[in-house]
């Protein structure tokens, strides 16, 4: 089974790498990928392994909270905190460590999905450490109450305390039912008497803060205030350590100053040492905690007390800045896809009601006012407006919409009030699919990401081995070598060696590139495809719907001895009963009402056209075979497109030319691709040869292959792939519906205009959300910029680290420089990665 787990509190790229490695070794796990940026673990494993996987993760990182966020599944929470409650919310587990309050905790869970028995299970846990609240905790099942009102809870960071709030609210007067969703911070409240609803809500707003300090209840969704990076509450150990360090420096000449330095070290860096020891006990040695601990403790041993404490303090300050920068980067990337609507205006019996978009069902009627974002996909049934579609397609020009037009979730209504009939539930809406696609793009790692992961596994142990040699070789082979001096240099080696700059900045840069592309209307389904896009030198296009509009239209109407209007009338009446796209285009071009009473004896002549009596006389419309079969004298025409010959009362009336127009942007798109380094542009189609040659000539294509079946297209693509130079890629651009086999066979499958097509999103590696082939060159430009930035980070990080390592050997550097080579370089690399967000 394929699962997606959210790893809350995962703030260390090296830890993400360790989790991926350790979980990947479990028997029954077929494939695993942990993405540090999105804090997600994508995994394929056998049935019944969830608890084993969670235990494996907690053995490595006890603070990490594991949630099953697989689409369509209930969330499965697994909490394990050093501070907080300390117990797991999982099935059939007993824990020795935990709450610390001294009480027995009884947890009640409903496990219909996990257990299958359908009964209530009571788990008894004894906890000795963890939760500081001192209360009995009961884990609760999170429910969404249909039709209930919502209150928003801010500042609640304990799941068991959420259960206490929920239980209290359920017992309040006028409350029929209540459910608090800890994950989303939403309190669902169903009242008994609607007329007293606001009074009840105000009482809830007053009473909840008395139950849990710092918790605030609001009627509207608000951004929860986050603690400042320099918050004393979050960083008090570091600040106390700095104060003691300053005092120790002032009294450095006193014999007892050592104990001030030591106390400062323990307060500021004790967590690092503790984490290193814990990881060593679990067999995970080579991480930044181990390296910093050995280096600073070693500095104490050689008498460099001041430097040992200073390095640990500056390391912790650097980690604080680094964490802040990474979190800001994550928010910046997430803000690119801030296209969800917070609410929907549901119309029930003409009464407007504000509800959550997830509560809306198919065929419900919603109202969208000017300035509001469309919450769901649907069809306009009343009103007209202009829509800003830039968030979905990158298109700057507004789109005019009228009744019967389909509209997509995520776009903004600019002026008019429109009423919409919902056609898809929220989970299947365009905005939901796009967000899921972008968020899960990190599951497919690029070759560069995989290389950095492997490199980090080898790099750190290698540097540790070199550090040992730096101590041993001079002492053994150099006469008079000072052991303490060479030990200090070796310890500096360790400080420098942490590969955080690479492990963090590469996946962050990849995700930034994918986010930037999505803002331009290009969905890239993984870092591997983003990296491959930079090497594309052959682009193969489907014709219909890709380079052409895919919509038949009347391009010529040539009468023979009759007026044009008369010819169009004959053609429109002849095609009145036909459902063929060509017939529709003729009726659309005629643009007048058709009196069907004038028609009788309609007959379709297979492969030739139609015959019908119009005002009692025979009317024919079809190809030259139909004219020949009925002995109509006509002039055969050679033109690019479909020719409909028309005859009335046994007299030739003229012909109508139907053709598929070339998109206005196609020619410019081909030119842009050529300018960006694409060597060959090829077109494949099942259409007639002369049609393809005409299109190829207009667009200046290098090759054209026509009259191909889907299987023939695959063979042509395979032939072109064989001609590709090493390291170069072939991209196929199609409509994503009929071309699925070719999309799958190409190095990169690109779906054109597939925003409304499930088939396109499933089949393609890249989806161009606006119907414009020029968007492919934008994607390639973003890919090249992103990969350039990542190579800058790699070269910059390695040059700085290797340079300082060489200086260290010759005694020309110290631990201060080592801290810069680790934390400082990481911070600069993260900031550089964020340049991938900006696309000109």
Image: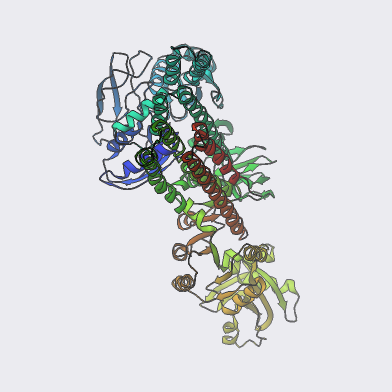
Find residue 633 and report its image quarter: bottom right
Left or right? Give the position of 608 relative to 718: right
Along the line of sight, the residue nearer the viewer: 582 or 767: 767
Q: How many marks?
A: 0
- In the displayed structure, 393 sits above or below 479; it is below
The residue at 75%/81% (across/down) is 561
- In the displayed structure, 672 sits above or below 191; it is below
- In the displayed structure, 210 sits above or below 15; it is above
Q: Give the color scheme: rainbow, by chain, secondary structure or one colour.
A: rainbow
* Residue lying farthest to the front in this orientation: 479
Along the line of sight, the residue nearer the viewer: 499 or 812: 812
Residue 526 seen in this snapshot? no
Along the line of sight, the residue nearer the viewer: 592 or 221: 221
Left or right? Give the position of 279 relative to 365: left
Along the line of sight, the residue nearer the viewer: 93 or 287: 287
Residue 500 rendering spot, x and y as whole percentages: 46, 39
The residue at 67%/83% (across/down) is 652
- In the displayed structure, 540 sits above or below 838; it is below
Find residue 54 and report its image quarter: top left
Residue 622 rendering spot, x and y as whole percentages: 59, 78
Left or right? Give the position of 490 relative to 578: left
Residue 501 rendering spot, x and y as whole percentages: 49, 41
Residue 8 seen in this snapshot? yes
Left or right? Give the position of 270 relative to 350: left
Residue 734 rendering spot, x and y as whole percentages: 53, 63
């Amino acid at each position: 089974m394929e699962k997606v787990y959210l790893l809350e509190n995962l703030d260390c790229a090296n830890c993400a790498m360790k989790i991926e490695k350790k979980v990947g070794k479990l028997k029954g796990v077929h494939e695993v990928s942990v993405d540090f940026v999105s804090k997600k673990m994508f995994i394929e494993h056998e049935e019944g392994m969830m608890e084993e996987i969670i235990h494996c993760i907690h053995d490595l990182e006890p603070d990490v909270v594991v949630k099953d966020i697989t689409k369509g599944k209930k969330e499965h929470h697994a909490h394990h905190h050093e501070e907080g409650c300390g117990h797991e919310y999982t099935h059939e587990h007993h824990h020795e460590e935990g709450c610390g309050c001294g009480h027995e905790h009884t947890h009640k869970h409903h496990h219909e999905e996990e257990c299958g028995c359908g009964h209530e299970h009571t788990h008894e846990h004894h906890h000795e450490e963890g939760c500081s609240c001192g209360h009995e905790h009961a884990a609760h099942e999170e429910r969404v109450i249909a039709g209930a009102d919502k209150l928003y809870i801010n500042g609640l960071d304990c799941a068991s305390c959420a259960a206490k709030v929920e239980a209290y609210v359920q017992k309040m007067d006028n409350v029929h039912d209540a459910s608090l969703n800890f994950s989303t911070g939403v309190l669902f409240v169903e009242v008994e008497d609607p007329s007293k609803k606001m009074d009840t809500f105000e009482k809830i707003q007053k009473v909840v803060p008395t139950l849990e300090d710092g918790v605030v209840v609001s009627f509207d969704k608000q951004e929860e205030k986050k603690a400042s990076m320099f918050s004393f509450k979050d960083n008090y150990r570091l600040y106390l350590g700095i104060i003691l360090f300053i005092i120790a420096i002032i009294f450095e000449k006193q014999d007892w100053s050592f104990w001030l330095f030591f106390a400062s070290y323990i307060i500021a860096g004790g967590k690092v040492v503790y984490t290193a020891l814990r990881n060593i006990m679990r067999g995970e040695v080579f991480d930044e905690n181990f390296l910093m601990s050995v280096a600073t403790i070693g500095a104490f041993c050689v008498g460099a007390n001041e430097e040992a404490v200073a390095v640990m303090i500056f390391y912790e300050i650097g980690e604080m800045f680094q964490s802040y920068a990474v979190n800001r980067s994550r928010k910046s990337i997430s803000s690119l896809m801030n296209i969800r609507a917070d609410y929907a205006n549901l119309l029930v019996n003409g009464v407007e009601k504000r509800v959550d978009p997830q509560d809306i069902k198919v065929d419900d009627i919603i109202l969208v006012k000017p300035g509001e974002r469309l919450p769901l996909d649907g069809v306009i049934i009343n009103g007209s407006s202009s829509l800003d579609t830039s968030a979905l397609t990158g298109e700057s020009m507004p789109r005019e919409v009228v009744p019967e037009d389909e509209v997509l979730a995520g776009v903004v209504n600019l002026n008019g009030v429109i009423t919409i009939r919902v056609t898809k539930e929220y989970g299947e809406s365009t905005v939901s699919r796009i967000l899921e696609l972008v968020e899960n793009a990190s599951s497919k790692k690029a070759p560069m990401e995989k290389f950095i992961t492997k490199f980090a596994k080898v790099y750190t142990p290698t540097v540790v081995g070199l550090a040992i040699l730096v101590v041993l070789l001079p002492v053994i082979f150099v006469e008079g070598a000072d052991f303490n001096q060479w030990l200090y240099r070796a310890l500096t080696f360790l400080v420098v060696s942490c590969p955080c700059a690479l492990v963090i900045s590469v996946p962050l840069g990849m995700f930034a590139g994918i986010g930037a592309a999505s803002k331009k209307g290009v969905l890239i389904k993984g870092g591997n495809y983003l990296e491959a896009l930079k090497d594309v030198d052959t682009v193969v296009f489907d014709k219909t719907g890709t380079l052409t509009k895919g919509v038949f239209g009347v391009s010529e109407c040539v009468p023979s001895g009759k007026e044009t209007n008369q010819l169009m009338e004959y053609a429109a009446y002849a095609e009145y009963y036909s459902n063929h796209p060509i017939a529709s285009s003729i009726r659309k071009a005629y643009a007048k009402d058709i009196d069907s009473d004038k028609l009788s004896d309609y007959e379709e002549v297979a492969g030739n056209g139609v015959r019908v009596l119009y005002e009692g006389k025979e009317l024919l419309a079809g190809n030259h075979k139909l004219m020949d079969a009925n002995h109509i004298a006509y002039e055969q025409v050679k033109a690019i497109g479909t020719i409909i010959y028309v005859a009335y009362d046994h007299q030739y009336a003229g012909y109508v030319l139907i053709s598929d127009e070339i998109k206005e942007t196609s020619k410019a798109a081909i030119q842009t691709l050529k300018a960006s380094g694409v060597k060959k542009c090829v077109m494949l189609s099942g259409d007639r040869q002369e049609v393809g040659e005409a299109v190829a000539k207009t667009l200046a294509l290098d090759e054209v292959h026509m009259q191909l079946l889907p299987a023939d297209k695959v063979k042509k693509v395979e032939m072109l792939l064989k001609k590709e130079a090493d390291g170069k890629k072939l991209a196929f651009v199609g409509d994503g519906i009929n071309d699925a086999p070719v999309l799958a066979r190409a190095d990169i499958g690109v779906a054109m205009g597939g925003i409304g097509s499930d088939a396109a999103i499933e089949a393609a590696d890249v989806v161009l959300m606006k119907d414009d082939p020029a968007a492919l060159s934008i994607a390639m430009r973003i890919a090249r910029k992103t990969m350039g930035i990542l190579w800058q980070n790699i070269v910059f990080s390695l040059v700085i680290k290797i340079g300082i390592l060489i200086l260290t050997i010759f005694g020309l550097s110290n631990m201060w420089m080592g801290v810069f080579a680790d934390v400082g370089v990481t911070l600069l690399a993260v900031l550089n990665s964020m340049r991938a967000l900006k696309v000109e």
